[in-house]
Amino acid sequence: MLFYPLLFEPIFKERIWGGTKLKEILNKSFDGSQIGESWELSTVENDISVVANGAFEGLNLNQLIEKYPTEVLGIKTIQYFGNNFPLLFKFIDAKEDLSIQVHPNDALAKERHNSFGKTEMWFVMQADDNARLVVGFKDKTNKKEYQEHLENKTLVAVLNEAPVKVGDAFFLETGTVHAIGAGVLLAEIQQTSDITYRLYDWDRVDANGVGRELHTDLALDAINFEPTNTKLNYDAAKNKSVNLVECPFFNTNILQISEKYNWKKTKESFTVLMCTEGSFTINMLRFKAEFKKGDTILIPAIIDSFDIIGEASLLEITI
């Protein structure tokens, strides 16, 4: 069987805070005007990505892994995570502020939900003027002070709000209180998990006057009350892979292509390429295809080299 770079059908999520940038900027095709998330690569229950190109078209990711576990995932991935795809990849368009929320760690998520926790990172692809992210506490606090602010609706006053621009990157360990602010379009890389504890939703209500569910009690044991440094500092370089994040769940590099680039890796793990700007061609034995901004490509572990030609900025994610 000839393995090749895989594209998947996006899974679109309508959100109360969503907008139209996924269509306008990333050329995604959908109906509606409140699409907040495009799940690019997922094995979350009931949201399993389906291959959209080539010989495997129509197979979902779990079916593909079941047939070819080592070829798709790689030995290192299987060693750590078994025959499970351990990551979830999204593009997120926040027309309005997302809720202030937190994610549990692996131990708490396993105990309560039989799930992975949700360590994640963000890469800003577009930001309106004065756009910002909420990322952790300004100063050290505790449960009592936090609950008082929550009850008095003054929680935002003790949270760190970071202004953002294109190219900014943030790493959020589990327990970090956070929110994506209005006007931000970003790529999100996270553990395979859909466990979110919502703390505050800006007193928002739907057309029937009903607010979304909050999870304030569950969140108490998940929150890190220490201030955290979430912004990533890096110096991108042309035609060189520059590291952004190394953690137990994923490694992320930024790769800016400006000419023909010979891409290489080991066969121990799959790699995912998220194109955040530009376009490029992948050229390998018996396979040649063009990709563009907004594409998320799974490179099966068995593929260890090919040529990339074009002008593009890529996030390069592996285990």
Image (tube, rainbow, N blue to C red):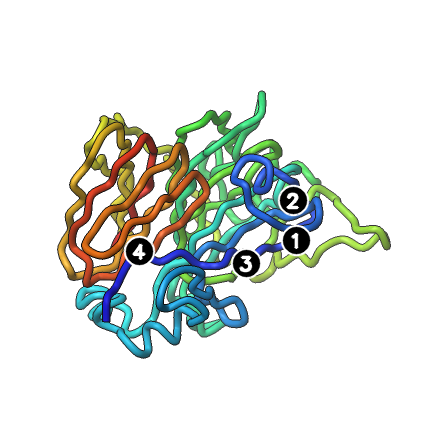
- Which of the 4 image quarters holds residue 252? top left
- Residue at label 4? 5
Q: Is residue 227 above or below residue 268?
A: above
Circle 2/circle 1 CB separation < 8 Å: yes
- Furthest-front residue in view? 286
Residue 119 left/right relative to 284: right
Please say if the residues under marks 4 and 3 sit with CB atoms less than 8 Å apart. no
Left or right: residue 53 versus residue 195 is left
Check disc 1 and report its element: helix, strand or loop: strand
Query: Which residue is identified by label 1?
Result: 14
Residue at the spot of label 2 = 18
Give me the residue at 48% from left, 27% from top: 164
Going by the picture, which residue comes out furthest to the right? Answer: 208
Q: Secondary structure at mark 2?
A: strand
Viewer-nearest of labels 1 and 3?
3
* Helix, strand or loop status at disc 4: loop
